[in-house]
Image (tube, rainbow, N blue to C red):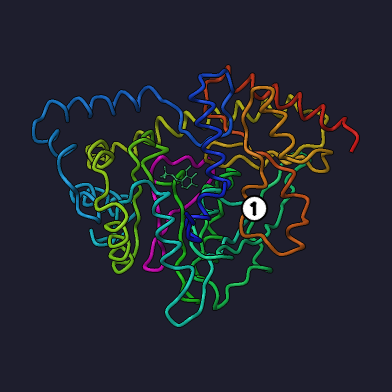
Amino acid sequence: MKLSAFGEKFANESGITTLMDDLGHAFASGSDMIMMGGGNPAHIPEVERQLKARMQAILSSEADFRRLIGIYDPPQGEQSFVIAIRDLLNREYGWSLKSENIALTNGSQAAFFMLFNLFGGAFSDGSTKQIQLPLAPEYIGYADAGLGHDFFKANRPDIELIDSTTFKYHVDFSTLDITDRTGAICVSRPTNPTGNVLTDSEMERLNRLAIENDVPLIVDGAYGTPFPNLIFSEATPFWNDNTIMCLSLSKFGLPAARTGIVIAREDIVQALSGVNAILNLATGSFGSMMAYDLVKSGDIIRLSNEVIRPFYLEKAKRAEESLREKLAGLPFRLHKVEGAMFLWLWLEGCPINSQELYERLKRKGVLVVPGHHFFLGLDAPNDREWPHRNECIRITYSQEPSKVEKGLAIIAEEVRSAYSTQP
Ligand SMILES: Cc1ncc(COP(=O)(O)O)c(C=O)c1O
């Protein structure tokens, strides 16, 4: 029995599969592993209380219960939820979206798979196009989402050294090349893995570049505005006909519902609905129904701003402060903490690479993610030799404080011992 090229691609271990496997096994084994590797959102009591109340209301209504379990939604997604999202965004940002601008997907991960293959890969004129990631490192989950070879092209960042232990990545526009091989530009904002938030002026320049080159700008707002709004700095949202904005209910607290929301030009929404019909027949109704009231009333924004964002901000501050204290005296650098749920630690000149550090930490009972996975699409020989890509780790701080504190102490101890290792 032989697998096709498509089958081979997924049969071979890929970054995201290995990572999700690692995380899943550690959870399932019930071990005491401290999980600082995943992107699982925290369990926030106030959010869970609201979702539970909604679930109970659905269960006590015959009609709603039937809609939840017994009806295929259209491939574009559940219509009343689509309308509620449209109205929320138009109300909040003064946009003029129509329902036809919105498609739901089974998680935003699925949306990226569909979008990347709508704009990248083989074209009917014989050409092939790539998805341009203007700023490496980028979200590991994009890595294997292209069906063709040589699918992503990433750009090394400009690194701003803010002080002796803090840095920030910026898009290096002097080396960013948008060519006729570019099918789309994609950024996550806030960025997974770094917690970076691209500035408004960077977004404006990317927007202009995309329009000038007639390619879409895909903005991954899984952590962004208006929900869950895990943004601790300034970031103005924008949308126009050339933007494809991807939102998700996951980081709000519904990762198991698998609900992604794509806001795009009507023909793109139509194409997405078509692919969705083939892949899934219909989008699951669970997320739409669970979040409907919250979106319609706008409470999803209130909860994001008043509960979720402060919850993560407090965790971020505490984790950052603690790690800085524990690493004092070592040549470490932390990316400026601007959003999402991660610390991105750069250990310049460390005698062991991030993979080895990850292995050591795993043996000590702490799971992080070695940074090299996030440098997808950076394949030129000089980029492959760039030491920075093997000098970073991603640390998730969304768990309960005592575990985070314990995990950070183990990380710091291991880093200290790594720096004292002779190469
Ligand atoms: C940046 C980013 N985009 C997209 C996703 C996919 O999320 P989901 O499929 O749960 O919507 C994630 C998940 O961690 C993410 O970190």
* Magenta highlight on residue 67: no
Q: How many numbered dots are placed on residues in this image?
A: 1
The residue singled out by tag 1 in the image is 375
**Residue situated in front as seen by the camera: 177 or 13:** 13
Residue 363 drawn at (x, y percent): 69, 25
Residue 290 against residue 381 in the figure, above or below: above
Residue 263 against residue 26 in the figure, above or below: below
Q: Is residue 188 visible?
A: no
**Residue situated in front as seen by the camera: 298 or 146:** 146
Disc 1 residue type (three-letter): Phe
Residue 148 is left or right of residue 90, and the answer is right
* Magenta highlight on residue 245: yes
Q: Is residue 106 visible?
A: yes
Mark 1 CB lies closer than 8 A to ligand 1: no
The magenta segment: 226-247
> Where, by quadrant of the figure, is residue 360 drawn?
top right
Residue 40 drawn at (x, y percent): 47, 33
User: Label 1: few (<14), some or many (≥20) within 10 Å?
Assistant: many
Residue 49 drawn at (x, y percent): 31, 23
Dot 1 lies on which element?
loop
Residue 404 against residue 208 in the figure, above or below: above
Residue 345 is left or right of residue 190, and the answer is right
Residue at point 55%, 66% (across, down): 205
Which residue of the protein is positioned furthest toward the front in this rendering? Answer: 1
Residue 335 drawn at (x, y percent): 66, 42
Residue at point 76%, 23% (across, down): 413
**Residue situated in front as seen by the camera: 413 or 74:** 74
Which residue of the protein is positioned furthest toward the right in this rendering? Answer: 422
Q: Main secondary structure of the magenta part?
A: loop
Residue at point 50%, 31% (across, down): 24
Q: Quadrant of the C terminus?
A: top right
